Image: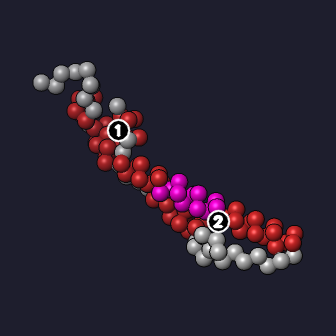
Amino acid sequence: MVVESVLNSEDLDKTLARLVVAARKDGYSQGYAECSQHVNSSLEVDWDISKSATYGVNTGAELTALKTEFNNLQLPVMDLINVALQSDAHVAQLKEIFPDEGEDLA
């Protein structure tokens, strides 16, 4: 139940999705730049890379910023868990946050 709450967090999901997209963009950008360098070198031409989708975009900075955001992500459910674990009655508080699906709460 606790793991599901963390993994199903909307904040985690959105941040991770943005991080994956940024990583792909940066990988594409770096790969495109490397490939164009090889083409320029082997064919002794000056291949125009200005048509690249990532031309002029600092994909590395965007990726670094999203990594930092991911590493500093604060999930509301984790705050509740931390508060409960500091209590003497931590089991009871955790059961309030994550009731057992089989228990009747009435």
Tell me: 96 left or right of 66: left
- Residue 29, numbered circle: 2
- Please, is residue 6 above or below residue 102 in the view? below
Q: Nearer the viewer, mark 1 or mark 2?
A: 2
**Magenta-drawn segment:** 18-28
Label drawn at residue 5? 1
Q: Position of residue 11 (x, y in %)?
A: 37, 51
> Residue lying farthest left?
106
Magenta highlight: main SS: helix
Question: Would you say residue 89 is visible in this rendering?
Answer: no
Quadrant of the rendered structure where residue 9 is?
A: top left
Q: Is residue 21 above or below residue 29?
A: above
Front in this rendered view, residue 91 or 76 = 76
Q: Residues within 10 Å of mark 1 (few under 14, many from 20)?
A: few
- Please report whichever mark, 1 or 2, sits nearer to the chain's N-terminal start: 1
Whether residue 26 is in magenta: the answer is yes
Q: Is residue 8 visible?
A: yes
